[in-house]
Image: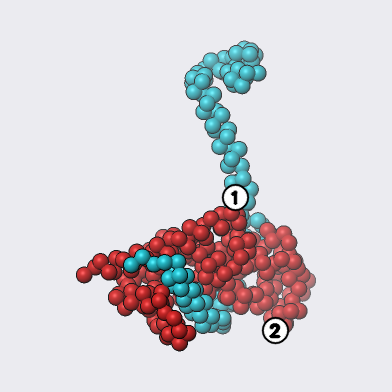
Chain colours: A cyan, B red
Amino acid sequence: MRWDHEGHEKVEGVLRDIYLTTGNHRPNSLDPDWKANALRRIRSLPESPGQIPLDWLFQHYLWRLAPAAGILILFLAVWMIQSGLNPDLEMAALALDNPFNFSLIETPGM
Amino acid sequence: MRYQQPKCDLPAAEIDDEAVIDRVLNGDTDAFALLMNKYGAMVVNRIKYHVPEDGLEETVQDAFVRAYRSLETCRDRKKFKAWLSSIAVNAAYDYLRKQYRRKETAVSKLTADHRDWLEHVSIQQSKEAYRRRLARSEARDVLDWALCQLPVKDRMVLELVHLQEIPVKEAAKLLGWSAVNVKVRSHRSRKKLRAIIENMIVREKEEP
């Protein structure tokens, strides 16, 4: 049997009503000790709430650098493919204070 | 400074969120109980639709512990309730994720009774018949089974947008995702749910 649109709508409507009905029937209150238990867990935390958690910092700031890091990696990979891997020559060019032969500057055409 | 016992019997409306948050951030951990009293029922109400009864208390506690740990990051203290709602929804989401990882979600096999129930639901006409169908235990079994087939992200979005009928923008704020992401995912998850139910009928029919 392949259901038509109406059949799907009916089933979804019933499932939605079941979902809401069973959710509504669940009690809104918990065991009276739940607050005490939560406070106990809070008091046992090593850090105070004034310290911003590291995971929050990572989530909100560090991942925002991901596109820039991706572009940088791509650029460096292209440059490496074009110029080949000659770190000794690059270092020598830098040491001789001869930046015109330094391929990082040559690649973008500067 | 003298230690002050938090007045937990204060009416919820009289509790000033901003003042209490200041007290907590200044080291008065016990003052956090005031926020728990004020918003406990709201957090339970947010979580109880997503998490089974045996995991409800643990998840509510998790939500408040997270709120306490991240209190400094609540920039707009006037919107503390919305901020706490978002933490509650994310605590429920993480609970489901853990359950999925441990493969503890009950995926029971559906029987011919469930299939019959579904087929009749799709063609039922009268309100009386509808009420009878709704009261059947098969109804919740089918819903639980179908939800367990969905990836946890799809499940969360489906529950918020299609089952609880929360607007996309609000669901996006609760989940901390972009509105576009929620919109696309809600559309996909709805299609997946339809396919799951339809496949279930077809498979059950093919089985001897």
Residue at 31% in and 66% down: B202
In the picture shown, does residue A87 fall above or below B65? above
Residue furthest left as drawn: B208
What amino acid type should be assigned to the residue bearing mark 1? Phe
- Disc 2 sits on a residue from what chain? B
Residue furthest right as drawn: B1
Residue at 52% in and 62% down: B157
Res B150 → quadrant: bottom left
Label 1: how many Cα within 10 Å (few below 14, some 14–19, many 20+): few
Q: Is mark 1 on a helix, strand or loop?
A: helix
Q: Where is residue B142 in the image (x, y as percent from the top left)?
A: 39, 73
Q: Position of residue A106 (x, y in %)?
A: 60, 17
Q: Mark 1 points at which residue?
A: A58
Q: Which label belongs to residue B126?
A: none
CA gap between label 2 and label 1 equals 38 Å
Q: Which label belongs to residue B9?
A: 2
B54 left or right, relative to B10:
left
Viewer-proximal residue, A60 or B206?
B206
Residue at 38% in and 74% down: B118
What amino acid type should be assigned to the residue bearing mark 2? Asp
Placement of the C terminus of chain B among the 4 image quadrants: bottom left
